[in-house]
Structure formats: C-alpha cells, structure tokens
Image (cartoon, coloured by chain):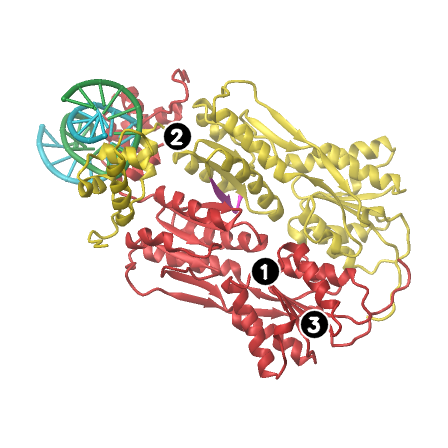
Chain colours: A red, B yellow, C green, D cyan
Amino acid sequence: MDERRLSTRPTMRDVADRVGLSIKSVSRVLNGDPGVSEAKAEHVLTVARELGFRRNDLARSLRLQDRTETIGVVVRQASTRFYDSLIRGIDEVAARHGALVLTATTQSAEREQSAVLALSSRRVDGLIIVPSGEDQSYLRAEAAARMPMVFVDRPARGISADTVVADNVAGGYAATQHLIARGHQRIGVIGTRSSASTMSERARGYRDACREAGLASEDLVRWNAHGQEGAQQACEELLGLAHPPTALFALNNVCTIGAVRALQGAQLSRQVALIGFDDFDTADLLNPPVTVITQDVEEMGRRAAEAIFSRIDGRPTTSRREKTVLPTTLIARGSGEIEPDRPVARRIGA
Amino acid sequence: MDERRLSTRPTMRDVADRVGLSIKSVSRVLNGDPGVSEAKAEHVLTVARELGFRRNDLARSLRLQDRTETIGVVVRQASTRFYDSLIRGIDEVAARHGALVLTATTQSAEREQSAVLALSSRRVDGLIIVPSGEDQSYLRAEAAARMPMVFVDRPARGISADTVVADNVAGGYAATQHLIARGHQRIGVIGTRSSASTMSERARGYRDACREAGLASEDLVRWNAHGQEGAQQACEELLGLAHPPTALFALNNVCTIGAVRALQGAQLSRQVALIGFDDFDTADLLNPPVTVITQDVEEMGRRAAEAIFSRIDGRPTTSRREKTVLPTTLIARGSGEIEPDRPVARRIGA
DNA sequence: GTGAAAGCGCTAACAA
DNA sequence: TTGTTAGCGCTTTCAC
C-alpha cells in the first residue's frame, strides 16, 4: 500500500529499509539461502509481499554473468501446426530444467536475423532456431562465444551447429513409393521454395523413387506454389495438362490443403490420388480422407531442447555437432490409396 | 578471431581497449550518438564486428530503468488458430514501435502465473495476457507499479485492466437465431468450461435467442466437452437422445471439429445442422462445409498491442480501463443452413 | 547470523 | 571531441 513513486518498482533496498536489515539479508531470504533467523526471514517475506516486490532478473542475470534461465526460440509464422507442436515439446523439457521459453516469431525471413540477435543481446542461455532465411552466418559471433544453439527442421547455413530434422528424403520416397505401388506412373508434385532444404529433400525422395521405378518425374514438379491459393493454382495447372498426373504429392500441409481445394473444385472424370507431407487437424474428415506423411514435431522440439540443455549444463560447445534425424510415418487414410483411372462416384441428391 | 576466454562475450570495455578509446566513446558509436569523429567511429565499428560484440541489453535496460523495448505475451496453448492470428496482429503493431514480442506459452492454467511473473521479473515494458486461470489477483503488484497490461479474449478477474474481447453474446445469439430462422426448435450446445467467460457468454447468447423464440434450451447444453474426443462424445450423447436436437452449436473450434466427427460417424436418417464458433482452416472443405461465427483474432491482437503501447508511450496507467469489444461475423457455408428433418442424401459408389 | 564493499556491463551527467 | 564518475539492482566475497 501507499505506492507513491510513480511506476517505480520496489527493490531489495526498499524491503531492507522497511524491515531494518541489510540488503544482503533480504537477498538471502528471497533466494532461500540459509543464514537468516526464522523470525527475520518471515518478516522479510511479509514486507516483500506487502510492497509487491519482484526481484529484478535483469540485475540478477547481469551479476550472475549471463545465466538468465531462459532459452530463446525463433520461428517464422507460417505452418501453424508445426509451430504449436514444436513449442509444446520444447516447453515440456524446459519446464523440467526450470527454464523459461521465450518465443519470438517473425513474419518474414528477413526479420529472422533481428529477432535472433535481439534474443542474443538479451542473453538467453540458448537458442532454438527454425531457420527461414538463406544464411545464418550472422551468428558467427554467438558461435565463437560458444552460445548453445540448435537448428530445427532445416540445418543452418554458413555456420555449424546442432541440428534436429525429419528424414525428409525418406518421407518423400515413402510417399512416392506408396503411389507407385498402387499403379501410378504420373505423379505431380507441388512445393513452395526449392531452395528450402526440407522441400528439396522431399522432392529428392520423390525423384529417387521415380528413378527406381523407371518413371520420368521432372516435368510434373511445380515450385513456387505459395500459400493455399498458389498451391491450388499449381494443382489446377497440373490437372489441366494434356496428359495430367493421376496422383499428387504436396510437399507441406499448406500445399496439401490447396491441393484438396483444387481437387474438389475440378470437374474430373477420374479420381486423383493425393498424399501430403505433414499431418493436419481435419485430414481424416475430408472426402476422401487425406493420406499423409507425418513427422513427430513435438519430439523434434523435445530433442532440440534436450540438446540445448545438455550444452548449457556442461557438454562442451566445442564438441562435435550432432545431427538428429527423426523418422517419418505414412498414415493411409484413403486419398493416397486411390488407384489410377478410378471413375468418380456419382452422387444423388445434394 | 583469437577467442581465448571461454564462453565470455566481448564487452564495450574490450572494444574500447582494442581501439584505444574510452568505453563511453564506444557506447556513443554503437548507439549512433553524435560526438565521435568519423574515423574513430569507423574504427570502433570495425573492431566491434571483428570481436563479435553484441551489446548486453540486460545491462542497458538495467541502467535505463526498466525500458527493455520488449513486450511479453502469455497464452495457453490450446486453440491453435487463435494463438497464431493473435501473435500476428501483435507483431505487426510491435514492429512499428520497434519492440520485441516475447511469447511464453503455458500448457496448463496453473502455469499461467509463473510465466507471467517470470516475464514481469524480466521487466518487459508491458504484458498481453490471454488468461486461462481463474484469478489474476497475483498481478496486484504489477498493477500498483503501473505496468501496462491488457487482457485478451477474456477479462481478468481480481484486478482491473484494459481488455479486448469479441462480442461473444452477440455471436452466440446470431448463431442460434440463424438456426431458429431455418426452423430448428431443438438446438444442442457443446462447450468446454462453463466457468470461462467466453463460453458462458456464447451460451448466454444462445439462451437469449431461445427465450425470445419461446424455445426451451437448458436440457440440450453439454458442458465439459474437453478436446475433440470429449466434444465428439457429448455430441453423440445428444444425438442419441430419445428426442434429439436437429441442430448443434459448438462453442469453439475444437468442439466444432469434434461435432463434425460425431456427425460423420453417426448413422443418421436426418441431417443435423451445425454452426461452430471460431473459424478454422478447412471449414469450407468439409462435407457439408461448416458455417461458423468468426472473430477477427488478428485485429484483437492489433488492438491489444495498440493499447499497450499507448500506455507505454504516455497514456497514464491510472486513467480509466478500456474495454474493447469486437464484432463477430457469421459465415454461411452450408452446415448451418440445413433445415430440420432433411433426409440424408444417399450415395452410390464409394 | 549479519553486513560492507565491490562489481556485473552499460549510459546519463558532467568535466575537460 | 573525448573521458571520468556514478549508479541501475543484484549477488559474491569476506569480514565481523
């Protein structure tokens, strides 16, 4: 009560003055350190509560030499589901280590650098980055200072660091193989940027499988399908070819949804198969239900956090970089099991 | 180069020593302050780059008396779409103000307090909170210290602060009205916690509309439908009643998806109408496409951020609390326009 | 059991 | 144009 000073928050000094003890004793009590008599400790706590004292962790961390008990996460906000699950995994591990997870999101790849450096300047104990920019060499200073860093989803470029990724090549291969096994010979691919390693690796899996089966592939790959609209257009273009694909492979879940839109909108005489990379909430509710390749994103988050804390808690940052590759799984739901040239079922009624 | 000291990052002192200037001059250069000769400034910048210097913002903020140029956001990770859009809106405004947005997510309502207080201890300049806990009186100290705070989606309890919410009552009313206008007399409701103000307000809109139309309502409301599974079960129970509802109103998008599951799974002789509160990505791709009440979550984020910065940039924190109520919109897609007792279309083929 | 002094890295105020 | 001093709020060291 009696909060005169405008917008200034009480310090240990204020508490100490009020209790009639030294600032050091207050510090001891508030940090649970021993060496203060029971009675006085109680008094300190009471006064601190009354005053609404909150320890200033800026000062604390400064004194403690860069131990902020905080880890920073930087992601670009694009594929919703990915982000959510990742943070869940990270949070789980961070909670066990008593650390706070601070996430900075960026709307564009260009802003990645400023977000990362802002976190670094705020002296987070470690950084988990889902790189969206083309180059991470701006982190050289942090690497030299041995700041623990882990890259998720894609490896960093221009710098070496621990990495946690999905086995994108295998996933792309499995999807394509699955379609080929059902008789498809012309499989279209829709992706965003071929420069993103995730994308190019998934496409590589596709090409590997095609080559193995003796199929041509390149002319059915469409890049730069951005957003649901872009993906939808790319699919429509593929389906409008003189000799159209009988199956589609969408390289991420935004592309997948765009593909579903294209397939629902098109007046096709034959059903077209579809497999999407990355699962999404209502995949099993669509008609037909969408077959997907899933990656365990939550596990990626967990692994990344574990890597960070093992670096923080002593594993020398000079030791060899670790690359964790997690498996993907195909979930067959229907759309990926459609065979070539199956006529569209006709419906009566609405 | 030559990074001897393990895991210690260079300071202005290091740069100053290397350049042969005082630390203050270095500070001036690195902050773009005037009063340093061109040549020396250049030298400072070069050396800083070489050394991989990053200003320690902990020290800076400490010295600057709690101006961290950072705002904290706390959300519970549950309804995906909500979170994403909210942050996008906040980021947009924060970028204009040159502030960094740090988000802390919590997996449970109990952890809300620790996340919020951790951010407060780190001296963020303002807090945007989507409250999940039952009581926010733990923020009394922050309120007394005039820390700018805005609550989004629901108002705070136990403390008064600026608030940005959707017009949940009106949304609930509009959904119900829409169904009643199409002839429905028995409308089931599925919600999570009746203690959450969002939920209870949406249900209130429902009850208002029912009362106005002279319909009974209470016996068709099902609370505690948690997660998609819970919602699905609650719907199945409603549909299994001797005298089942002819329409459903799902109070959030998780409930909506659960409801879709229930409707797709059930062997019904009649189609059941459905309206969901809050839009979701594939709502228009389901069969039938799902009619929803949308709230402009991105705008909520923008408004919340604007409120925070107007407090930070001078609007006295003692001035009256503002409550912003944003309108909701009904998007008719099909599921909400089904009339009572319309027979299910029969299908031929798969 | 308690406290005084020093200092973490930075910047504002004031000298030179 | 440049540097010195002091101090933000905290914790560590060491003395009492």
Q: Toward which corner of the image does residue A1 lie, by quadrant?
A: top left
Q: Amino acid at mark 1?
A: Thr
Of badges 3 and 1, the one in the foreground is: 1
Q: Main secondary structure of the magenta part?
A: strand
Position of B109 compared to A126: left or right? right
CA gap, disc 1 and disc 2: 40 Å
Residue linked to disc 1? A192
Residue linked to disc 2? B67
**Label 3: how many Cα within 10 Å (few below 14, some 14–19, many 20+):** many
CA gap, disc 3 and disc 1: 18 Å
Of badges 1 and 2, the one in the foreground is: 1
Badge 1 marks a residue whose secondary structure is loop
Q: Please determine whether, in this image, residue A344 is positioned above or below residue B122.
A: below
Position of A325 compared to B338: left or right? left
CA gap, disc 3 and disc 2: 56 Å
Q: Please determine whether, in this image, residue A227 is positioned above or below residue B148.
A: below
Disc number for residue A247: 3
Disc number for residue A209: none
- The answer to which of A163 and A51 lies nearer the viewer is A163
Q: Residue at x 73, y 50 (%)?
A: B234
Q: Residue A49, how many percent across, how many down? A: 39, 27
Q: Residue at x 72, y 73 (%)?
A: A246
Q: Residue at x 66, y 38 (%)?
A: B296
Position of A74 compared to A246: left or right? left
Do residues under tags 1 and 2 come within 8 Å of each other at their CB atoms? no
Q: Residue B8, how many percent across, how many down? A: 25, 48
Give the mark nearest the N terminus, 3 or 1.
1
Q: Which chain does tag 1 point to?
A: A
Give the residues in magenta.
B101-109
Q: Is residue B108 magenta?
A: yes
